[in-house]
Image (cartoon, rainbow, N blue to C red):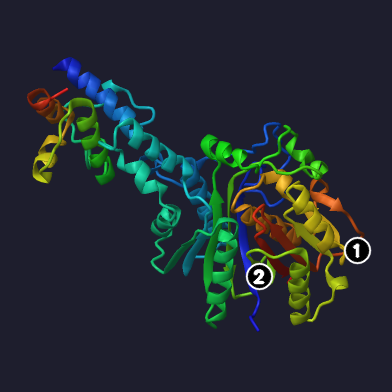
Amino acid sequence: MKQPIYIKSACAISPQHSFNKEEFGKPWTSADTNLLQAIQPDHSQYISPVAIRRMSKLLKMGISSGMQCVKEAGINEIHGIITGTGQGSTLDMEQFLKDMIRLNEEALNPTYFIQSTNNSVNGWLAMLTKCTAYNQTYVHRGLSFDLALFDAMLMLNETTATKYLLVGGFDNMTDEYYIIKDKIGYWKKDRINSLELLLHNRSAGTIAGEGSAFVTVTNNPEDTMCALHSIELLPDADAAETALTINNILQANNLSPDDIDTIVCGMNGDKDNQLFFDTILADYPNATIAAYKHLCGEYDTASAFGTWVTATIIKNNHVPEELIVKRNVQKKIQNALYCNRTLLNQTTIMLLSNNQ
Amino acid sequence: MEDLKSTLKQQIIDSLNLQGMKPEDIDDNAPLFGEGLGLDSIDSLELMVLMERNYGIKIEDARDGRKVLESVQSMAEYIQANRKL
């Protein structure tokens, strides 16, 4: 059986005031355009003026959130950088492709090409942290971040020496990408207020979002936010298969459904997604149910933001009202389930606990 | 020549996204790399693309590129002598 790993620090750049804040930041931001855009921090605190001038938004978000996460962990050395991104820097890729057409494939700017590669954030983080150890970027659509975290768990289980790994997920939403996804029915047809997303769960589609979130994970439980006991990835499971997987996770950790006091869900307002969660959550009538995608929108690595939300909730022992789908009375958040599901039915289950 | 240098400086600023910088801030003879503007190897590629796109000049030999991209003055002189656009 895998040993738990521990989240030492967490940092998120999102459409909410989440950066550099221990609690969820007020005021809550919303959009009526079916597209939530990330609030940008002062990136110049993390990136030199010479380097920052040619960086795209995604690169800046990834570097700033990764570096801030390492800073908050208060560690001198990291032993690996593992990230996930569904699309990489689409902004650079789109610009490069547009230039190819406009300039008839001649005299193309190298910067857009260099930065459009999916591992450019990892490369920068490695240089800035001087980390020459394991460096990996997973690109598996809605499971990209989750695979990175899974890889980190396996790595930390292979050693008894104290190790720290930087794990993150990042994606940005461009106008072009939004339009393409709109054409295949990803987004809701009606314009809705993002904070009311979950009230519109009888229609198809969701709202778009973007962001970058990182955690440092370790096998040393001292001074950490929470413990991560298990992570399971289901590429295309239905509700029954998912429920069975959750039961197996609980049994492996000597827990019953009644021991779960909080469930953080990746509900995205889509009618089929809601039906899935209604089925899953029926087994947990006593748990407090929280959701987060009305705060960040749907994107391939929204799960990284969801992990930041879950770790922050456990650390603060408090679920903010704006996240509550159903509140149950509880003294302390002890065992939390995390369940994300994308529009492609990719599902991630995590079991986390308060280890303080 | 002065007009060319002024245009070239603005093109360098735009191409390399040198935020907050104006053409008059760039000395004609200051080195573009290292101590002067502090540009790096990716910038040198961008400058070569700039010359090809705006003046039809392709620098095939890296040794030539090193001399041509020394300063705004050297770039302007090379452009004036070799421009096709």
**Mark 1 belongs to chain:** A
Name the residue tied to disc 1: A285
- Vertical side of A351 occupied by A254: above or below: below
From the top left corner, tell me how far across and down residue A141 is, in percent.
56, 56
Q: Quadrant of the C terminus of chain A?
A: bottom right
Counting residues from the N terminus, which is met first, the one under dot 2 or under dot 1?
Answer: 2
Chain letter for mark 2, please. Answer: A
Does residue A354 appear in this view?
no
Q: Residues within 10 Å of mark 2 (few under 14, many from 20)?
A: many
Q: CA distance from mark 2 to mark 1?
A: 23 Å
Q: Which of the 4 image quarters holds residue A181?
A: top right
Q: Amino acid at mark 2?
A: Ile
Counting from the top left corner in percent of width and height, residue A350 is at: 70, 67
Look at the numbered disc 1 and give the secondary structure of its residue. loop
Residue with the mark numbered 2 = A231
Q: Is residue A128 left or right of residue A295?
A: left
A93 with respect to A302 (left or right): left
On the image, the x and y values in percent for residue A260 come to 83, 69
